[in-house]
């Protein structure tokens, strides 16, 4: 069963690892200078990751029919780099927020916060695995198909269904909203073998998908409106942030290198 919010967990682990290395430099000497080798490396790698966040996912969205991996994987990568990159840039500042660098840091933090808001609205809209938006009629068709598959299993494997009913205590697909319940399901699935295990794994995916579609269908229209508003704010903010970033990089190169 897929781990929920995997990209957030991976970003957290990466940030934790970077923090441990950073604290090692702090304990060894002092806060790394933004102009030093380590500080510069943080800034360069972080900025490259921010560029990847801004560019790669946007390119993939323009070519929805391309076979470059699923959109949900590109979105996960977009979120991962959009968290780890700005964090590295923040460490690059040496905790000095004067002048243009301070403005850039503030804008970066705002755009990261805006990204979290956009992620919420994005996931609230029903989509295919390729990221294409599903209309209300398509959602209802998928829900009907899911229900038909579940009923088919109930007819073919009544004993197994009794075990599942006991496990879920008569709850519907919303049962999977709890991480504790998902762990119970995984343990139950692991206790089975052969065809029963495959059937239970498929049923779990169907029930989770049904829960997601039901929730999304009830809030889809509002989410679409808010996502449109969010785009009109987030995209110009991103352009402004990278404009300031390139000005900052140009100024650093001029004063630290070319003017010497």
Image (spheres, grey):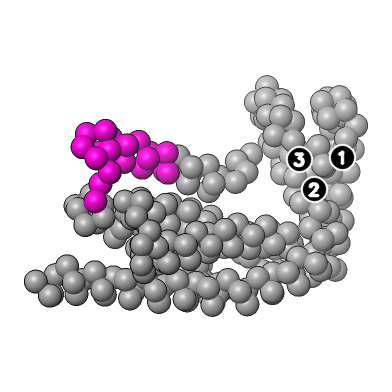
Query: x, y percentage for residue 54?
Result: 46, 68
The alpha-carbon separation of the residues under discs 3 and 2 comes to 8 Å
Q: Is residue 226 above or below residue 188?
A: below
* Label 2 secondary element: helix
**Would you say the residues marked 2 and 1 are in contact, meaning their CB atoms lie under 8 Å apart?**
yes
- Determine the residue located farthest toward the top in the rendered image: 191
Is 85 within the magenta?
Answer: no
**Would you say the residues marked 3 and 1 are in contact, meaning their CB atoms lie under 8 Å apart?**
no
Disc 3 crowd, CA 10 A, few/some/many (<14, 14-19, 20+): few
* Label 1 secondary element: loop
Quadrant in the rendering for residue 221: bottom right
Q: Earlier in the sequence, mark 2 or mark 1?
A: 1
Residue linked to disc 2: 211
Mark 3 or 2, closer to the camera: 3
Q: Earlier in the sequence, mark 3 or mark 2?
A: 3
Residue linked to disc 1: 172
Q: Is residue 159 visible?
A: no
Query: x, y percentage for residue 222?
Result: 80, 67
Residue linked to disc 3: 177
Q: Main secondary structure of the magenta part?
A: helix
* Label 3 secondary element: helix
Q: Residue at x 22, y 34 (%)?
A: 28
Q: Does residue 167 appear to the left or right of 129 in the view shown?
A: right
Q: Is residue 35 visible?
A: yes
Disc 2 crowd, CA 10 A, few/some/many (<14, 14-19, 20+): some
Magenta region: 14-33
The alpha-carbon separation of the residues under discs 2 and 1 comes to 8 Å
Q: Residue at x 18, y 72 (%)?
A: 255
């Amino acid at each position: 069963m897929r781990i929920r919010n995997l990209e957030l967990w991976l970003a957290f682990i990466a940030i934790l690892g970077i923090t441990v290395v950073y604290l090692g430099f702090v304990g060894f000497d002092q806060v790394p200078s933004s102009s030093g080798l380590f500080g510069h490396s943080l800034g360069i790698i972080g900025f490259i990751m921010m560029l990847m966040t801004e560019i790669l996912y946007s390119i993939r969205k323009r070519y929805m029919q391309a076979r470059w991996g699923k959109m949900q994987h590109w979105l996960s990568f977009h979120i991962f780099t959009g968290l780890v990159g700005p964090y590295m840039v923040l460490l690059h500042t040496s905790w000095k927020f004067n002048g243009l660098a301070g403005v850039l840091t503030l804008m970066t933090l705002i755009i990261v916060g805006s990204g979290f808001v956009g992620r919420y609205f994005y996931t609230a809209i029903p989509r295919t695995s390729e990221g294409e938006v599903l209309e209300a009629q398509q959602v209802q068709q998928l829900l009907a198909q899911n229900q038909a598959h579940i009923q088919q299993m109930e007819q073919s494997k009544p004993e197994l269904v009794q075990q599942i009913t006991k496990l879920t205590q008569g709850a519907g697909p919303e049962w999977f909203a709890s991480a504790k319940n998902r762990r119970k399901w995984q343990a139950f699935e692991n206790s089975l073998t052969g065809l029963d295990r495959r059937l239970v794994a498929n049923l779990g995916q169907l029930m989770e998908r049904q829960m997601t579609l039901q929730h999304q269908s009830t809030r889809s229209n509002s989410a679409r409106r808010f996502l449109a508003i969010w785009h009109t704010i987030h995209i110009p903010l991103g352009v402004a942030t990278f404009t300031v970033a390139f000005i900052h990089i140009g100024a650093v190169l001029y004063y630290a290198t070319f003017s010497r």
